[in-house]
Amino acid sequence: MTIFRPHIALSFPSTVWRLQIDGQTDLLGIELRNEADKQTSFASLNLVTGQMYFTDLTLPERWLTGIEGIYQGIMLLHYYKQETGPEHKAIIAIDTATGAERWSNYSLALDHLAAAGPVVYNTNMLPKKLMLADILTGQTLRPFDAATDKPLENNIRTPAMLTAGELPPGILPDEPYGNMVHYLNHNNYIIVSLHTLKNGALQQHLYIINNNEVIYHDLLNQDIQKLQPEAFVLHKNILVYIKNKAEIKALKL
């Protein structure tokens, strides 16, 4: 029987707020937020080898900043226009291998990542005009063409939310609270996360099941007050999940 063990198990002093994966280079970008100190920081690592490239990267703006995505080894960060709104401004491009700034532009904002590169717009111009930009320099190259500029494939699978009754009978090791399960099937392994109610408190669990037998289990959260969102994603053959809001683990399936 195969017994899985994480090849990545990292703990951070701040809350893991957002993860972004570069499907081309297998790089993971991490946004960390310390609400007590109002400090946002960033980290980067290789999902295949587990090599950490940098941690505790900060910008001059301590709090109103975040991660947009990663493309060809470049991490794209942003600022927020205001603390109470979701609107972004500026693009700061960081080399994920060194943490060095490659370029920045405070007039542009990222709309999305296309296969050909970042699609940006000038936040000072209306109506919004989308342009394709060079990831290495930040220079705008040409107008974005939705017909030819296809979305970037990221090789990431997210679990489906199913009711317990939609799964084969007897496959779940615990009765899920709320009757809902996050479910993914990969390489004949069933990956589920579910909530249980133990002594009046909610817990969140992750299981990997093979031939109706649990071959991996981790307690993700305990003594929580409400149901948590999906706990894991699958990048190619690597399962990535967050534990206790401040730990990242990854397993090769």
Image (tube, rainbow, N blue to C red):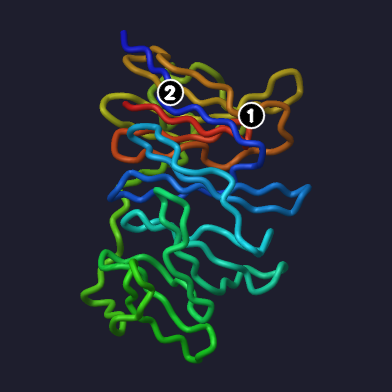
In the picture of the structure, the residue carrying the numbered disc 2 is 6
| Pointer 1 with pointer 2, Cβ within 8 A | no
In which quarter of the view is residue 124 placed?
A: bottom right
Of 215 and 45, nearer the camera is 45
Q: Residue at x 77, y 50 (%)?
A: 37
In which quarter of the view is residue 203 placed?
A: top right
Q: Label 1, label 2: how many angstroms apart (C-alpha)? A: 17 Å
Q: Residue at x 53, y 73 (%)?
A: 90
Q: Left or right: 42 with respect to 136?
A: right
Crowdedness near tag 2: few (<14), some (14–19) or many (≥20) residues, C-alpha within 10 Å: some
| Mark in front: 1 vs 2 | 2
Q: Looking at numbered disc 2 in the image, what kind of residue is underneath it? A: Pro
Above/below status of 248 relative to 107: above
Q: Left or right: 121 with respect to 61?
A: left
Q: Residue at x 39, y 48 (%)?
A: 97
The image position of residue 101, as x and y in percent, is 47, 62
Residue farthest to the top? 1
Above/below status of 127 relative to 15: below
Q: Quadrant of the C terminus?
A: top left
Residue 99 visible to the viewer:
yes
Q: Looking at numbered disc 1 in the image, what kind of residue is underneath it? A: Asn
In the picture of the structure, the residue carrying the numbered disc 1 is 221
Q: Residue at x 61, y 36 (%)?
A: 12
Q: Quadrant of the N terminus?
A: top left
Circle 2: element type: loop
The image position of residue 136, as x and y in percent, is 33, 67
